[in-house]
Image: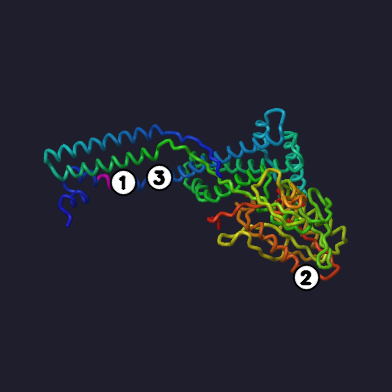
Amino acid sequence: MLSPTIVALLFGGNDVIGWIVQIGFLAFFVIFMFYGQRFQMMVMLREVETHLTRLKLIRDDGRKKALDTIKEIGKPAGDPTERIDQFLEYIAIEPQNMDPSGIVWKLEHLLDVRDVRFKDEVKLMAPEADEAQINNLENTLEAAMALNMIYKVIRHFYLLGKKTLSLYVIMQIQMVLPLIMKQAEAYAQALRAFSLGQPIGDGAGALVAAKLMQGHKTREIARDVVAAEVPIDGRTAYVLKAKGPGGNVGKPGEGIKKLIEEKKGKISTIIMIDAALKLEGEKPGEVAEGVGAAIGGPGVEQFKIEDAILKNKIPVNAIIVKQDIGDAVSPMRKEIFDATDPVIERIKRLIMERTKKGDNIIIAGIGNTIGIGQ
Amino acid sequence: MAENVDNAQKYSPFLLVIILIFFVLSLAALFIAVESLIEQADALNSYSFLLVGFFGLALSIYMLLQSRGKPMRVTLELPRVITTLECPKCDFKNVRDFQRDDYIFKETGSCQKCNETMKITAIYREAKKKES
């Protein structure tokens, strides 16, 4: 049994304290009725602010890492800080799509210009770096650019939310923050892997191709794409991948197109191997098979491949190695590395089942070939 | 292996003033409670002040601890990356930490057994138990 004193204390008596407690309760309800949303907004803003501070630290750390790597590898004569800061703000304006006809070629041209410009900038920043190191440094700076962009976008929404005091502006950024933070951390890991030249999860396809072309003569079939002629069970496989070991994805679409033209369309099948994003619950390194052009990026290379195979009615098979965004851009996990042997087995099985002796086949290992030679 | 980036968080003077006011009021409530308990005056009021005083004191200490200028850290786990070298002649394997300029299929170093040039056959991140 509660004593009358305690009962009076908890539920309010007729004394001064009881009145204060009751007025306090009433005030609490009235305040929350009118200002509840504002309190909720303040809590959300605080959360966004905390994440924004963390993003800033990640961004600054990435910038510092990129700067240190350029100084260490490139040995520039002067201080490259200002040039790097300008590079981090670099923009690429997408082509106008009101009339979509021919947009792929416009986009390809812009991407080529961007790529050449990036490489020239890196060469100026790091005059002592060799070709592979220039590619790695370019990738490092691109990761730093991505971190800078993420930070600035989140800061934009945070400040906009603060300025307009709109719950919906703040809410939309607060809801996606966990995914954005995951992405930012993945880019931070990627930056380190690029600066050291370590193979990344995205290179699974390139690694499979490199394993297949080992011991065979390679030639540069398209810009930054190498190909080798590999005999497999009486068939001739043209294996291609981006030119390593520098960070590079090359132009595999261009390579496949050229090979088809060289063979006058006489290609029995194309097998493409690439890393693909897994769903939560799936294991990293899981291998799946299907049809279609397994290639990511802005879509130009996929378009070229689809265009070339349609003209010649060539079947295209896809093998993917599953991984999450963090694994795709951070140093290659053992599970992903180990998945390359089962992929090769699947390729051989596909070749046996889908082609006959004497046929020509294209095997394309797609992905960033950083840290993977040929 | 981890790399830390430290950055001191800013104090909020406004929050510190509120905490101070809260703290002083709580002490005052406790003083009144103890005084009335000693004098054996109104028991209900004494216990109420005691409760309010302790609650306020706990809350202000908690707020003060929370708002301390703790350095904010960004800890990025740097995974251990392993390089495996193999001798193409005698299959001798050498496993070591990754070094800059290592790449898969690079020919580097000589075999301890047969003196043949070794080749890097694998570079991967060491698996962690907690990773799914």
**How many marks on residues?**
3
Relative to A120, A174 lies left or right = left
The chain holding disc 1 is A
At 69% from the left and 45% from the top, the residue drawn is A197
- The quarter of the displayed image where residue A205 is located: bottom right
Question: Which residue in the protein does label 2 denote?
Answer: A352
Going by the numbered disc 2, the residue's amino acid type is: Met
Going by the numbered disc 3, the residue's amino acid type is: Phe
Q: Position of residue B84 (x, y in %)?
A: 68, 52
- A89 is within the stretch colored magenta: no
Secondary structure mostly taken by the magenta-highlighted segment of the chain: helix
Q: Are marks 2 and 1 on the same chain?
A: yes
Question: Which residue in the protein does label 1 denote?
Answer: A28
Which numbered tag is attached to residue A39? 3
Q: Secondary structure at mark 2?
A: helix
Query: Disc 1 or 3, which lies upstream in sequence?
Result: 1
Mark 2 vs 3: CB contact within 8 A: no
The structure's colour scheme is rainbow
- A28 is within the stretch colored magenta: yes
Stretch in magenta: A23-29
- Give me the C-alpha separation between circle 1 and circle 3: 12 Å
Q: Which quadrant is the N terminus of chain A positioned in?
A: bottom left
The chain holding disc 3 is A
In the displayed structure, A263 sits above or below B111; it is below
Q: Residues within 10 Å of mark 1 (few under 14, many from 20)?
A: few
